[in-house]
Image (cartoon, grey):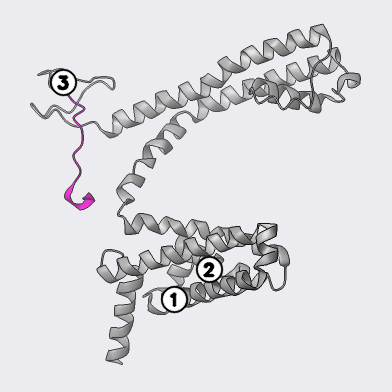
Amino acid sequence: MDNLQTWRERLYTIIFQADTPAGRRFDAWLLVVILASLLVVMLDSMQDTQTQYKTWLLWLEWLFTAIFAVEYLLRLYCSPKPLRYAFSFYGLIDLLAVLPAFLALLFASAQYLMVVRIIRVLRVFRILKLTPYLRQANYLMTALRGSQQKITVFFLCILILVTVFGALMYVVEGPANGFSSIPKSIYWAIVTLTTVGFGDITPKTPLGQAIASVVMVAGYSIIAVPTGIFTAEMAAAMRQGTRHACPNCAKDSHESEAAFCSRCGEKLYARQQASPDQG
């Protein structure tokens, strides 16, 4: 029993502890297998390659499926809380990496779900200790939350604008020139306003072309609005996240836009130095 417990603990260290040499090697090899399996899936999607190497690709796919299945079972076996792992983010991804191959036996279309394995590449953050960089995503989330109401109002205005332009073009151009309905005219207004310009519907009358010109010009200025809103919120979030007490006099109450201490004039936004554990 003691030997079995020791084996489980050792297996847990190798599979779950990326900070140990054995765990780092295990995750590195696992990433190689994941990338190789993705390469097989991509090659299988190419008709010529799939026809010429169908048997090889099939055997390789089942080989990778067997490896992932064994790895998943080992994780369940050595995990102190198997259910917690099974319903965790990585646990569900590991399960999804195995299921499509078996589901493909019943449903042919299920094989396309194998591309979900690319999500497992996220384990590279554990291997290379890039997790601290993920914390920078908090700035993005803060900026998105801060700009949510402004961007919502902006998109409502855009919705009203494209509806008005679409209805106007439906009246001016009509079904004879491809504007067969108001929804289709709204589609044209969205494509034109965003400067995508598919060209599947084009105005033919001089008045319609004049309206289209207004929509095109408006598109350039409108696109910059959400970018400016988000950039401002992003700058505010980063400023708030990097704020420190004055390094000279320790005063910690300053205006939100202050770059220098109001008491002694010391710079407030000194660059943060990496902590030892982020090495």
Query: Residue 86 at what x, y percent from top left?
Result: 48, 69
Label 2 Cα crowd, 10 Å radius (few <14 / some 14-19 / many 20+): some
Residue 256 inside the magenta-drawn segment: no
- Please say if the residues under marks 2 and 1 sit with CB atoms less than 8 Å apart: no
Look at the image and tell me whether residue 241 can be seen.
Answer: yes
Which of the 4 image quadrants contains residue 234? top left
- Please say if the residues under marks 3 and 1 sit with CB atoms less than 8 Å apart: no
Q: 13 or 83: which is nearer to us?
A: 13
Which badge, 3 or 1, comes first in the chain's sequence? 1
Distance between mark 3 and mark 1 Cα atoms: 54 Å
Q: Which amino acid is tagged 1?
A: Leu
Q: 57 or 185: which is nearer to us?
A: 57
Query: Residue 108 at what x, y percent from top left?
Result: 72, 66
Which badge, 2 or 1, comes first in the chain's sequence? 1
* Residue 129 relative to residue 87: left or right: left
Examine the rendered structure and indicate whether residue 82 appears above or below residue 156.
below
State the residue at coordinates (18%, 30%). Answer: 270
- Please say if the residues under marks 2 and 3 sit with CB atoms less than 8 Å apart: no
Q: Residue at label 1?
A: 76
- Helix, strand or loop at label 2? It is helix
Q: Residue at label 3?
A: 261
Residue 103: which disc?
none
Q: Which amino acid is tagged 2?
A: Leu
Query: Residue 77 at what x, y percent from top left?
Result: 42, 79
Query: Residue 245 at what x, y percent from top left?
Result: 16, 30
Q: Which amino acid is tagged 3?
A: Cys
Which secondary structure class fits the magenta region best? loop
- Helix, strand or loop at label 3? It is loop
Q: Residue at label 2?
A: 95
Which of the 4 image quadrants contains residue 198? top right
Which range of residues does the magenta coloring cover?
267-279
Which badge, 2 or 3, comes first in the chain's sequence? 2
